[in-house]
Image (cartoon, grey):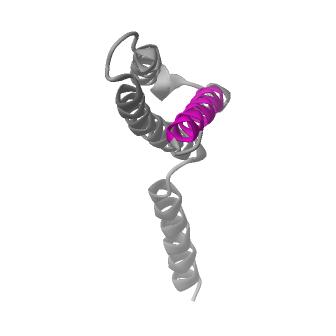
Amino acid sequence: MTIALLLLVSALVIAALVYSRSRPSRRDRAMRDVLDAADALEAQLRVARAEIEAVTGGDGDDPVGEAMREMLRQRLWLRDHGPDASLAQLDEVRTSIDAARGRIDQQLSRIAQARAPGA
């Protein structure tokens, strides 16, 4: 009976260890969230560039270019430092990306209002 109990407890401990290792850690989730936010911002920047070019005819400055370069810098930072970054650093990058998305949303709204009939 004691051996059976010992085997059962051992099996439960092993199962708990396997389960805990199979779940992504908070840090892994934070890294995934940052990368997802970066992908969304990059897609949004492409839309913004297309909208701006539609309004301006593609002439003049490229206001989205600097934002795209900043996104590249953040992706390179994540590649180089992400595996060792603290949760606070990852949260800071995510906050920065979310703020940039908010600014792009505002710009896209202004463009849509300017393009609307009767504007």
Residue sitting nearer the eye, 116 or 33: 116
Q: Is residue 4 left or right of residue 106?
A: left
Q: Position of residue 98 (x, y in %)?
A: 61, 35
Task: Residue 101: say if magenta.
Answer: yes
| Residue appearing at x 62%, y 26% in the figure | 96
Specify the quadrant that holds the C terminus: top right
The residue sitting at the top extreme is: 61
| Residue appearing at x 53%, y 46% in the figure | 29
Q: Is residue 8 left or right of residue 52?
A: right
What secondary structure prevails in the magenta region?
helix
Span colored in magenta: 91-115
Q: Position of residue 41 (x, y in %)?
A: 47, 35
Residue 12 image-quadrant placement: bottom right
95 w.r.t. 21: above or below: above
Specify the quadrant that holds the N terminus: bottom right
Residue sitting nearer the eye, 2 or 85: 85
Task: Residue 112: say if magenta.
Answer: yes
Q: Position of residue 6 (x, y in %)?
A: 56, 76
The residue sitting at the left extreme is: 58
| Residue appearing at x 55%, y 24% in the figure | 85
The residue sitting at the bottom extreme is: 1
| Residue appearing at x 47%, y 19% in the figure | 67
Q: Position of residue 20 (x, y in %)?
A: 53, 58
